[in-house]
Image: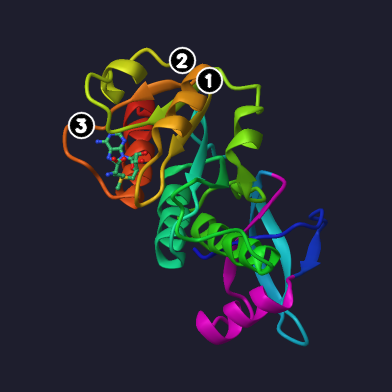
Amino acid sequence: MQRYFVEQKIENQFTLSKDDSYHILKVMRMSLGNQIEIVSNGKTYISEIICLEPFVVAKVVEEIEESQELPISVTLAQALVKEQKMDLILQKTTELGIDQVIPFQAMRSVVKIDKKENKKRERWQKIVKEASEQSKRTMIPKVLGTMTVTELLSLEDYDVKLLCTVRENTKNIKNLLSNIVEGAKMIVVVGPEGGFTEEEEEQFIRSGFQTVSLGKSVLRTETASIFIMSVVRYLSMR
Ligand code: SAM
């Protein structure tokens, strides 16, 4: 069943947004009596379409219990990378259960923070919303505003802070995460296409980030981010 996230409080019946109405009618070609899943405030409701115009109205049939979210909260601090790569990272890490994404400006990021920042963020938030609906999550990850490395270093409130690096003699992710406990809050930093500078890596390490290897081969930045989330998802399986 197709899933839609809505921000409003769900009463007995509710009106969907213009975008969702368009998707329901023109893309999914649904009609009166068809059912959709609505997620509001972490709760899922099976609902039936009762009106089509001007926007779709649905009424709640039943609330269902489900828990799709990972028991570990992961924030990905992703160095700014080219648009298509960022889109892919956002989409795939959302499917895999990411909680939050913080884009940041690394020294070697080819893409820089610019005046289109707000527009980009809107687009990124739309990508994670659609990926959450497609993968049937019960929450939409947050995409925060682009930070500098200094801003990133000042973030507290994480139990596990990892820096993905291709440096030799670094502990691998399997060893580091095998004992991670449910409820842990983790932040993982992934560098841009050209990698981190020595100086950046030293800054992260001085601020309490633990270096982590994802294996001996050098992965593309988008592969690294998707791989980390796959590992966390695998380790969370019961
Ligand atoms: N030549 C670059 C360097 O020396 O860092 C390679 C950068 S790699 C394409 C982009 C980012 O992905 C790295 O900065 C790192 O965060 C992550 N990464 C890629 N492969 C990795 C690996 N095997 N272990 C840990 N991190 C990795």
Name the residue at 60% across, 29% down: 153
- Give the residue pinned by disc 2: 181
Q: Amino acid at mark 2?
A: Val
Q: Position of residue 69 (x, y in %)?
A: 52, 37
Query: Is residue 159 placed above or below 28 in the rendered structure?
Result: above
Secondary structure category for the residue under label 3: loop
> Disc 1 vs disc 2: Cβ atoms closer than 8 Å?
yes
Query: Is residue 182 placed above or below 110 in the rendered structure?
Result: above
Name the residue at 74% across, 65% down: 59
Disc 3 or disc 2, which is closer to the eye? 3
Q: Is residue 147 magenta?
A: no
Q: Position of residue 14 (x, y in %)?
A: 79, 66
Q: Mark 3 or 1 closer to N-term?
A: 1
Locate ligand 1 by image quadrant.
top left
Instruction: Please give the range of residues in magenta.
Output: 16-41
In three-dimensional space, the C-alpha distance between marks 3 and 1, rounded to whole angstroms, equals 23 Å
Q: Is 13 placed left or right of 234 in the picture? A: right
Q: Amino acid at mark 3?
A: Gly
- Mark linked to residue 215: 3
Mark 3 close to ligand 1, CB under 8 Å: yes
Q: Is residue 24 magenta?
A: yes
Secondary structure category for the residue under label 2: loop
